[in-house]
């Protein structure tokens, strides 16, 4: 039977049943997906021999290897596939992408821990395109996304075009929850927020209060206007 952390058949045991080891989090085993399991020819696929070694190492340290990318807490992928997968999951707060060496790093530091995502200066614009009609559902999708990616309005970025371009790109991934983003081009989403900030910002603030960003910054846009050089204003 395939192992899944979503609706899995694992028992909810007592303290004695709780997993032990470095590769655990919040009282349960960390679920890893080894990229190449279902896509052996894809860029960044981990070779079969290395996957077997990783499986043993993960299991010996309290983790679980799952059969599907969707079920993983952390996806392990070779160097050539790191950036594409990181971009795919950059707005996910609970799914990380790491190189195979991440397992050894966790064991060496004695804890399952990801590096803090650094903030960088913002910049860039993009010419406009035509817009289509927006619905209340579109507005709520937009608010949820901004609350996740830009929880602090002081950090800027909500009016930059690059995040919206990346947002629309996410719609091509059928296994993510961004199909809604394909309804409008990137600058239409941007203009929708820009022209409706007074109405949308209170909704976004409430969503941030209900689901604050994680301490390590996962899922948050990694650029911050407060990190820009003196005399330069970015958004």
Image: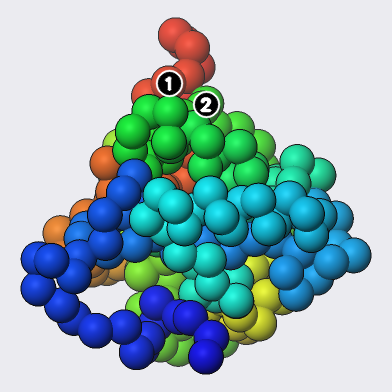
The reply to whether residue 62 is in sight is yes
Q: Residue 68 appears at what percent x and percent y?
A: 60, 76
Q: Residue 79 appears at what percent x and percent y?
A: 75, 41
Q: Is residue 113 left or right of residue 184?
A: left
Q: Is residue 181 left or right of residue 231?
A: right
Residue closest to the eye, 176 or 166? 176
Q: Residue 37 appears at what percent x and percent y?
A: 73, 69
Q: Is residue 68 above or below residue 128?
A: below
Residue closest to the eye, 168 or 175? 175
For image coordinates 31% across by 49% down, the residue present is 21
Q: Residues within 10 Å of mark 1 (few under 14, many from 20)?
A: some
The residue tagged with tag 1: helix, strand or loop?
helix
Rendered image: mark on residue 192:
none
Which residue lies under the disc numbered 1? Answer: 227
Q: Is residue 46 above or below residue 68?
A: above
Q: Quadrant of residue 70?
A: bottom right
List the single residue furthest toward the right. 41
Q: Residues within 10 Å of mark 2 (few under 14, many from 20)?
A: some
Q: Do the residues bearing badges 1 and 2 touch, measured as CB atoms within 8 Å?
A: yes
Which residue lies under the disc numbered 2? Answer: 121
Residue closest to the eye, 219 or 11? 11
List the single residue furthest toward the left. 14
Task: Determine the CA span between mark 1 and mark 2.
Answer: 6 Å
For image coordinates 40% across by 77% down, the residue present is 5
The reply to whether residue 95 is in sight is no
Q: Is residue 130 left or right of residue 178?
A: right
For image coordinates 37% across by 86% down, the residue present is 8
The mark tally for this picture is: 2
Q: Residue 44 appears at what percent x and percent y?
A: 80, 52
Query: Between disc 1 and disc 2, whose residue precedes?
Result: 2
């Amino acid at each position: 039977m395939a192992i899944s952390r979503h609706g899995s058949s694992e028992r909810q045991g007592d303290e004695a049943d709780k997993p032990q080891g470095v590769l655990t989090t919040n009282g349960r085993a960390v679920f890893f997906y080894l990229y190449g399991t279902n896509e052996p020819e894809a860029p960044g696929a981990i070779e079969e021999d290395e996957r077997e070694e990783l499986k043993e190492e993960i299991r010996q340290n309290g983790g679980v290897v799952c059969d599907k990318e969707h079920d993983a807490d952390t996806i392990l992928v070779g160097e050539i596939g790191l950036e594409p997968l990181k971009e795919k999951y950059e707005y996910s707060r609970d799914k990380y992408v790491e190189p195979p060496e991440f397992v050894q790093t966790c064991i060496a530091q004695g804890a399952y821990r990801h590096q803090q995502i650094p903030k960088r200066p913002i910049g860039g614009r993009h010419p406009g395109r035509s817009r289509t009609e927006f619905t209340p559902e579109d507005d709520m999708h937009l608010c949820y996304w901004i609350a996740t990616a830009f929880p602090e309005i002081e950090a800027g970025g909500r009016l930059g075009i690059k995040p919206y371009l990346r947002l629309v790109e996410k719609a091509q991934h059928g296994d993510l929850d961004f199909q809604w983003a394909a309804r409008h081009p990137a600058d239409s989403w941007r203009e929708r927020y820009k022209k409706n900030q007074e109405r949308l910002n209170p909704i976004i603030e409430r969503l941030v209060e209900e689901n604050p960003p994680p301490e390590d910054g996962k899922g948050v846009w990694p650029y911050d206007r407060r990190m820009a050089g003196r005399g330069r204003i970015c958004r």
